[in-house]
Image (cartoon, coloured by chain):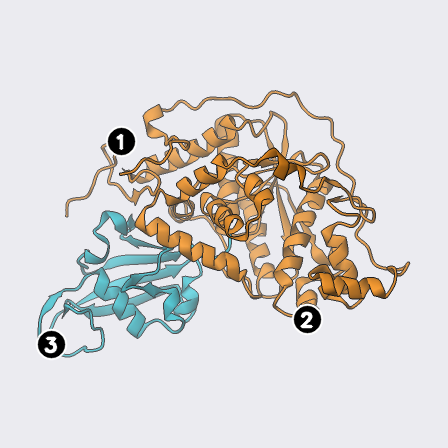
Chain colours: A cyan, B orange
Amino acid sequence: MTFISLRIEFSGGLELLFSNEKRHKITIPAQVPVDNNPKVDGPRNGDTKAADMDFLIHWLREHLLKERTELFMENSTVRPGILVLINDTDWELEGEGEYQLKDNDEIVFISTLHGG
Amino acid sequence: MAPKLCALCSTNKAILKRPKTGQQVCKDCFFYVFETEVHHTITRAGLFKPGDKVAIGASGGKDSTVLAHVLKTLNERYNYGLILFLLSIDEGITGYRDDSLETVKRNQQQYDMPLKILSYDELYGWTMDAIVSQVGRKNNCTFCGVFRRQALDRGAAMLNVDHIVTGHNADDIAETVLMNIMRGDIARLGRCTSIVTEGEDTIKRSKPFKYAYEKEIVMYAYFKKLDYFSTECIYSPDAYRGHARTFLKELEAARPSAIIDIIHSGEAFEIREEVKAGQKSQQTCKRCGYMSSNDLCKACTLLEGLERGMAGSGITERERKKLDAEGRAPENLRTIPFYRRSTRTPGPEVPIVVEAQVDPAMITDHYRPYTAE
């Protein structure tokens, strides 16, 4: 089974939900279940797809998020008001949840919901 | 997927989809259009005159940090001739404001602007920590809001400035429009979209980011690697505003122009003269000289309640009656120092109208009314 490594960064107050750590290095499977189930790490049965942002968000909730899920996710994606960058580009230009992750991608999540 | 090219320069890779226009732009074009739109907001509204002394209300958060950076940039680029200051209010919230003020102190160095910090403790004799220990977490935002407003004016008077600018952005204003509608607060609905507020006796205030989307402010800070502080206040956040905010973000996700559309709706409301006539006229507070719609201003009323151990008297009518029943305020009651507006001789009455050298097609027309897709 092949894996891909990713650099993840949380800021704008979002890091508070992730052990107050801004930067994380993670490894996820290159092929993942189509239903985005992040729990199984071994060999998989059933339909798979290449790991994408939708899967990553579910994976982060399962493995890195420490508290208050509702401040990170809503309706199977990130909560409105959280900005996402893929290799320093707005994810809205990269296909959002459908973006297929590559080895060494850098994904940044920034909350805009904290005080100005 | 092949990288998308910038819609403006057609050369560099696009890094941002602008929420206002849906345009995809590269980093340099984004900085340029963002700054130029703020410049247009400033010149169209005639906010500044050459020689104006302007205090930037600085919390260390994203909005005021970006505002300080952009105003410094525009002041140099277009020769506004402004003298800029940072003005911070220390509410006295341990673990929150003390950390954010460290950010403001770094900003002072980074932007080379004089910084004035005025604390609630110094002005009112009470920190927010002390207030919360007396009133609890339910109404403390009322105290903080009233005290901050007056503290900013007083800090500005100490700096002898003409003008305070704040980092309120388009999302904040749209949120306030929604809240005023939901509360039926016609007076505030009428004025909450104004870019400038100025009483006879108060220092001019304005919001140069009135049309700037929060998404773009945060992206600007990210790409410029600006140093800002982002932690929620440790005392209960304003729950009502929180709901308005969540609702607005959901609207924005469905249609990004929702924010500017709501501001436009707020601007389009016309308040009938009879309704305006029913609103209280402004006078000055008999105790501290600050503007007020009653004999005592809201800050003096709240402070008296705190000092006499009946903090609720500034909040509810029933508590107020209890306080009145105990008789007049004692002679030795702590009061706020008397407010005197700075009497600086104004500069020439000509607003800055430097036009940016920019292709008009690059600039969003903020007043374009919503048309159905």
Mark 3 crowdedness (10 Å alpha carbons): few <14, some 14-19, many ≥20: few
> Which residue bears the numbered disc 2?
B133
What is the quadrant of the C terminus of chain B in the image? top left
| Relative depth, front residue between B280 and B346 | B280
Q: Position of residue B75 (x, y in %)?
A: 53, 31
> Mark 1 is on which residue type?
Cys
Q: CA distance from mark 1 to mark 3?
A: 46 Å
| Relative depth, front residue between B262 and A3 | B262
Which of discs 2 and 1 lies nearer the camera? The answer is 2
User: Which residue shows up at 24% across the image and 54% down it?
Assistant: A96
Is there a contact, CB below 8 Å, between mark 2 and mark 1? no
> Which residue bears the numbered disc 1?
B9
Residue B204 appears anywhere in the view: no
- Relative to B79, is B108 above or below? below
Q: Tell me which chain the residue with mark 3 is part of.
A: A
> Mark 3 is on which residue type?
Arg
> Which residue bears the numbered disc 3?
A44
Q: N-terminal of the two: label 2 or label 1?
A: 1
User: Which residue shows up at 73% across the image and 36% down it?
Assistant: B201
